Amino acid sequence: MARTSTEEDPDEAWVVALAAAVGGAPEAGVGVGDDAAVLDAAGHVVTTDTMVEGVHWDDRLSPADVGFKLVAVNVSDVGAMGGRPQWATLAASVPTPMDRAWLSAFAEGLQAGLRRWGTRLVGGDTTRSPGPRVFSLTVGGQAPRPVLRSGARPGDHVWVTGALGRSAEAFLAPAPGPEAMAWLRRPLPPVALGAALADAGLVHAMLDLSDGLARDLGRLCRASGVGARVDPASLPGGRPLVQAVAFGEDYELCFAAPPAASDAICSLAAMYGVSVSCVGTFTPSPELVLIGHPAWPAPAFDHFPRGPA
């Protein structure tokens, strides 16, 4: 059986240390370490995601796809907190001379994403970039019963929504299928289901799968002080293991729930038209175990790759 440690990710540790140095968590809320910050006891949540040309997209995405996806990756974080997105601000850095046709198409895609998830653009900023295009979206919303990463308990089931590995197939396969390409360009995170699961009190912990199941499940386990055993035969999507767990950009939910909640979870997911799969169990031992495999696949993407020591 493959095992991997749930020790802290060095990059994640740097962000936590930076936040502590400049002020830490908001009063009566939750700061760095979850998909979004919880600002107060009323459950106001806020998150920011950035997309950089050449890092987060290339010519496989149209300008409109970039605008839509920028909304999707942000509202995914809000849904993973059990929240509903409400407003957004945009920061755009673009090279000169401005390509107005490109920016017009980007704006159309952005507007389509905002409409889909009932979110209003309320402000932002635009600056000149000496390099590639860079867009940052900040999204705020409401999570009356926020779900954190820190609530998983030994014995809880590990659940995921949707199909894993679609974006990975689009990037890695020599001839990706149309479903994979569509998800890469315009992912549709199950935001409403995340909010409904929280409202119903069915889940103990939750996060969105933006960096791959292996990495993101490890973050949830570290936050909760547990480990997990994952059955690769239960992973939804039918794609190779490296695509299913080690790439990212799934923008699906991963959550912990007690076994007694299984029927209610399946019923609620069916109401929202979202498939759900139980893929494992949380354990007291602080290890991630991949049943039947000698090793977890190495991450197929890393924002900060480490060279030789």
Image (spheres, helix red, strand yellow):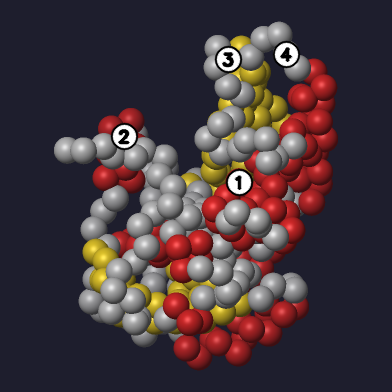
Residue at 67% of width from left, 10% of height from top? Answer: 96
**What label sits on residue 18 in the rendered view?**
2
- Closest to the observer, 28 or 61: 61
| Residue at mark 2 to residue at mark 3: CA–CA distance | 25 Å
Q: Which residue is mark 1?
A: 74
Neighbor class of circle 3 (other Cα within 10 Å; few <14, some 14-19, many 20+) is: few
**What label sits on residue 59 in the rendered view?**
none
**What label sits on residue 129 in the rendered view?**
3
Residue 168 vs 200, above or below: the answer is above
Amino acid of disc 3:
Ser
Q: Residue furthest top?
A: 97
| Residue at mark 1 to residue at mark 2: CA–CA distance | 22 Å
Please identify, in this view, whether the residue under mark 3 or under mark 1 is nearer the observer: 3
Residue 237 vs 249, above or below: the answer is below
Residue at 82% of width from left, 22% of height from top? Answer: 101
Amino acid of disc 4:
Met
